[in-house]
Amino acid sequence: MANDSSQKHSDFPAIHFPCELVLGAVTAPFLLTLIAGKLISQGFQELGQLSEEAFRGDRLPLLKFPSNGSSSTDPHSPDTP
């Protein structure tokens, strides 16, 4: 049985790539992916900060509600002296 297992491995030609070639081919896409991920992350963070600024309460206009006849009895009404 030992001959069968060694013969199976010798039937297929072995393809050997130099480690430097594989490492060189993988390095550039890996670095580009890291840089693109960082840029996208920063973009989303800036977008979130801009949306917070747009919806912050001190920049929204004050709304004036119409007063009814009962507002004259309200002590917190700005119309009462």
Image (cartoon, rainbow, N blue to C red):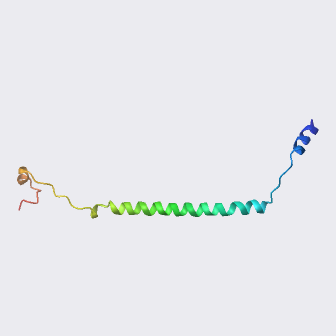
Q: Tell me where residue 77 appears, x and y as whole percent.
A: 11, 57
Q: State the count of labels.
A: 0
Is 32 left, or right, of 3 in this rendering?
Answer: left
Q: Tell me where residue 9 appears, x and y as whole percent.
A: 87, 44
Question: Which residue is pictured at 89% across the width and 43% down the height?
Answer: 11
Seen as rendered, the residue at the extreme right is 3
Is 46 left, or right, of 24 in this rendering?
Answer: left
Q: Tell me where residue 34 appears, x and y as whole percent.
A: 60, 61
Task: Return the residue nearer the eye: 75 or 37.
Answer: 37
Is 31 left, or right, of 4 in this rendering?
Answer: left
Q: Tell me where residue 30 appears, x and y as whole percent.
A: 64, 60
The quarter of the displayed image where residue 4 is located: top right
The quarter of the displayed image where residue 63 is located: bottom left
Seen as rendered, the residue at the extreme top is 1
Quadrant of the image containing the C terminus: bottom left
Task: Return the residue nearer the eye: 33 or 76.
Answer: 33
The quarter of the displayed image where residue 47 is located: bottom left
Question: Which residue is pictured at 46% across the width and 60% down the height?
Answer: 44
Question: Which residue is pictured at 78% across the width and 60% down the height?
Answer: 19
Quadrant of the image containing the N terminus: top right
Q: Is residue 2 above or below residue 79?
A: above
Question: Which residue is pictured at 11% across the width and 60% down the height?
Answer: 78
Is 48 left, or right, of 12 in this rendering?
Answer: left
